[in-house]
Image (cartoon, rainbow, N blue to C red):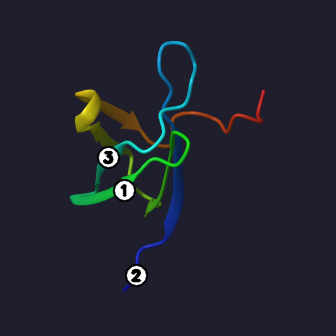
Amino acid sequence: MKRPKTLLRVVLRDRDGTTIPDADYVLEVAGTKLTGTTSDGLVEKPVPADADEAELRVPRLKIAIRLKLGHLDPRDVV
């Protein structure tokens, strides 16, 4: 049986607010490692809808970010 998915979208920016293009990343969610490369800073992957946590690692930048999924309203909600 397939689990329902939702789309995770995160934009990586540097301290100046400039997006970080072409950075390889590893997104670990629900025991699965997903890999990719940012497109103009964008990380966009389908993830299980019931996942509540993920870790995003960008080796080139030596960062690891723990993400709490479902804890923020969409950016168009006041």
The residue at the point 47 percent across, 33 percent down is 20
Is residue 26 depicted above or below 47 in this figure?
A: above
Residue tagged by mark 1?
Answer: 36
Decide which of 37, 66 is in the foreground and name it.
37
| Marked residue nearer the N-terminal end (1 or 2) | 2
Amino acid at pointer 2: Lys
Residue tagged by mark 3?
Answer: 25
Instruction: Give percent across and percent down for residue 44.
Output: 50, 53
| Marked residue nearer the N-terminal end (3 or 1) | 3
Decide which of 43, 78 is in the foreground and name it.
43
Q: Residue furthest bottom?
A: 1
Amino acid at pointer 1: Gly
The residue at the point 38 percent across, 36 percent down is 67
The residue at the point 45 percent across, 42 percent down is 69
Is residue 56 depicted above or below 16 in this figure?
A: below
Amino acid at pointer 3: Tyr
Decide which of 58, 33 is in the foreground and name it.
58
Residue tagged by mark 2?
Answer: 2
Instruction: Give percent across and percent down for residue 68.
Output: 41, 36
The residue at the point 77 percent across, 36 percent down is 76
- Identify the element where label 3 is drawn: strand
Is residue 22 depicted above or below 68 in this figure?
A: below
- Identify the element where label 2 is drawn: loop
Instruction: Give percent across and percent down for residue 59.
Output: 22, 37
Residue count near mark 3 (Cα–Cα under 10 Å), binned few <14, some 14–19, many ≥20: many
Q: Nearer the viewer, mark 3 or mark 2?
A: 3
> In whole angstroms, how far apart are the C-alphas of marks 3 and 2?
25 Å
Determine contact: label 3, label 1, CB under 8 Å: yes
